[in-house]
Image: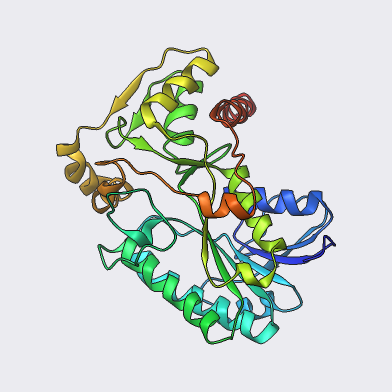
Amino acid sequence: MSNVARSIAVFGYGAVGRALTEALTARGDGVRVVQRSAPSNLPKGATFQAAGASDGASIGRACSGVETVVCCTGFPYRSDVWRQQWPALMRALLDGCTASGARFVFADNLYMYGPQTRPLTEDMPLTSYGRKPAIRAEITRLWQRAHEEGRVRAVAVRAADFYGPDCANSVVSAYGVAKFVAGGPALVPYPPDRLHDFTYVPDFARALVSLIDADDDAYGQAWHVPNAPTRTLRDILTRAAELAGVTPRITVLPQPLLPLVGFFNRQVGELVEMRFQWDRPYVVDASKFGARFWADASPFDEGLTATIRSYRAALAAS
C-alpha cells in the first residue's frame, strides 16, 4: 500500500491504543479513538467517538468512514467478563467492518495456543484448554472465518506479555519498575527464573502500523511481534533495578499460596490456569514477521529506561 495519510479507528485507549495513536498521528494519519468515555487528552490529529463494547449499533457507526479498524480493547482480567464481552465485541467489530469495507487489525495476545513445549509459532493449532485461552481461540476463529468468507480483510498481530510506560497490569512495569521507583521490592506472582519473552509496547504499536500499511496478502493470518533477546523475568527486573540505581529486591509469591491468595484477589486467582506461561520456557518465534517486515526490536535497556523515566515522572507529579 502507498505511504499516504490514512483514516484509522482505534478501539481502546490503554497502553497499546495510546502508543498506536501517537505513532499514527505523528506521521499525519487521521485517528478516531473509540471507547465508552473520552480520554483526558488526545494527540493532535486524533478525535474521539463514543461506543460501548456491548452496543453493536455504536460500534458499527465507529467503523464507518475509515480505511482500517484496529482493536486494542482490553477487558478486566476475569474469565467471566471475557466470556460475556469478547465474542460479542468481536462479532460487532467484524459486522461493522463488513458494512463499511474497512480492514480489521486485531492487537492480540498468545493465549490461544494454550500449553506448549516449544517456541510459539503462528501455525500452532488453537487450544480448547482452560477458560481465557479457550475464549481467545474462539474469537480467533471468528475473525478467521470472516476473512475466509470474504466478508472482512482481517489480520492478528500477537504480542507476548508487554511492558513499558504506564502498563497497569504488566509484571515488569507495574509490579517491578513502579515498585523499585517507589522504594520497595518487586512483587512477582509467579517463579521468575524461566526464559520468558516480553514485548515492549512501542514495538507492539510499530508492528500494528506495519500491518496497517501492508498489502492485502498479509491478511488472513497472524503475525508475532519481534522481541528483545529472551531473558528470565529475574534478569530483566535485576537490570531494571540497576538502571534505576536501586537494590534489586524481588519478592516472589510462593506457588502453593496462589490459589489461597486468589480467593481474596480475583486477578491473582485468574493466573492459576495460566501457569503454563511460567512453569516452562515461554518463547515466541517471530521469524515470520522479521522476514517480511522488521526484526530490530527495542533492547531491554532502552525499554526499561523509558519505563523508569515514566514512573518517576508519575511519582513526582503525585
Q: Residue furthest left?
A: 256
Q: Measured from the top left, where is residue 115 in percent x and y?
A: 27, 54
Query: Most extreme residue toward the front, as rendered?
Result: 291
Left or right of 43 in this view: 159: left
Q: Is residue 99 visible?
A: yes
Which quarter of the figure has residue 253?
top left
Q: Position of residue 62 (x, y in %)?
A: 68, 74
Q: Is residue 139 above or below residue 181?
A: below
Give the residue drawn at x 45%, y 34%. Answer: 172
Q: Residue at x 40, y 16 (%)?
A: 248
Residue drawn at point x = 69 percent, y = 63 percent: 214
Q: Quadrant of residue 45?
A: bottom right
Compared to residue 300, the image places residue 130 above or below, namely below
Coordinates of residue 186 in the picture (x, y in percent): 39, 26
**Relative to 189, is 157 on the left or the right?**
right
Work out which quarter of the rendered image holds the C terminus and state it. top right
Please determine whether, in this image, residue 186 is positioned above or below residue 78. Answer: above
